[in-house]
Image (cartoon, helix red, strand yellow):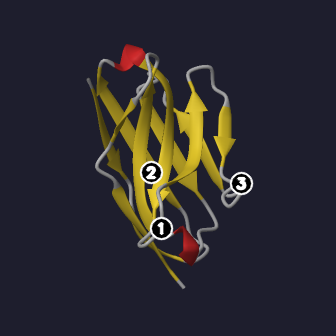
Amino acid sequence: QVQLVESGGGLVQAGGSLRLSCLASGSIFNINAMGWYRQAPGKHRELVARITSGGTTNYADSVKGRFTISRGNAKNTVYLQMNSLKPEDTAIYYCNAEIISGGGYWGKGTQVTVSS
């Protein structure tokens, strides 16, 4: 079992920045990759950014150049630095951990609201 706890969401004006954090606990040695997803009202959950245990990253086209995913030194924390935020970035952001054997775990989510 892996538990994920997100923090760092909030309300920010367009053009501003936020940093999300996700702390993983439990069987973290089984984690192959971690990522951030988001879900806006009436829309499907979508991948925002992902980082593998080897450090490879990938981003949604809509956030490239504005968002950066990174890991903490202990490898059980993942961050999402969000700059130049836009109203369309408003969503609930979820942390995800992919397990080596398949499947994964989700955090409860943190709300990000960007006002225009």
> What residue type is disc 2 on?
Leu
Task: Name the one closer to the observer, 32 or 116.
Answer: 32
Looking at the rendered image, the disc whose residue lies closer to the viewer, 2 or 1, is 1
Helix, strand or loop status at disc 2: strand
Task: Identify the image quadrant of residue 101.
Answer: top left
Helix, strand or loop status at disc 3: loop
Asked whether the residues under the numbered discs 1 and 3 touch, taking CB atoms below 8 Å apart as contact, a structural biologist would say no
The residue under label 2 is 20
> What residue type is disc 3 on?
Lys
Asked whether the residues under the numbered discs 2 and 1 touch, taking CB atoms below 8 Å apart as contact, a structural biologist would say no
Residue 34 relative to residue 48: left or right: left
Looking at the rendered image, the disc whose residue lies closer to the viewer, 1 or 3, is 1
Q: Is residue 53 placed above or below 49 in the rendered structure?
A: above
Q: Is residue 95 placed above or below 60 in the rendered structure?
A: above
What residue is drawn where x is 48% and y is 50%?
37
Query: Looking at the picture, how far across and down is residue 90, in whole percent?
Result: 48, 70
Task: Identify the image quadrant of residue 61.
Answer: bottom right
Helix, strand or loop status at disc 1: loop
What residue is drawn where x is 48% and y is 61%?
44
The residue under label 1 is 43
The residue under label 3 is 64
Which residue lies most toward the bottom here? 116
Q: Is residue 112 placed above or below 8 in the rendered structure?
A: below
Tell me the crowding category of disc 3: few under 14, some 14 to 19, or many 20 or more residues within 10 angstroms, Cα based. few
Query: Looking at the picture, how far across and down is residue 46, in whole percent?
Result: 53, 54
Q: Earlier in the sequence, mark 2 or mark 1?
A: 2
Distance Cα–Cα, label 2 vs label 1: 21 Å
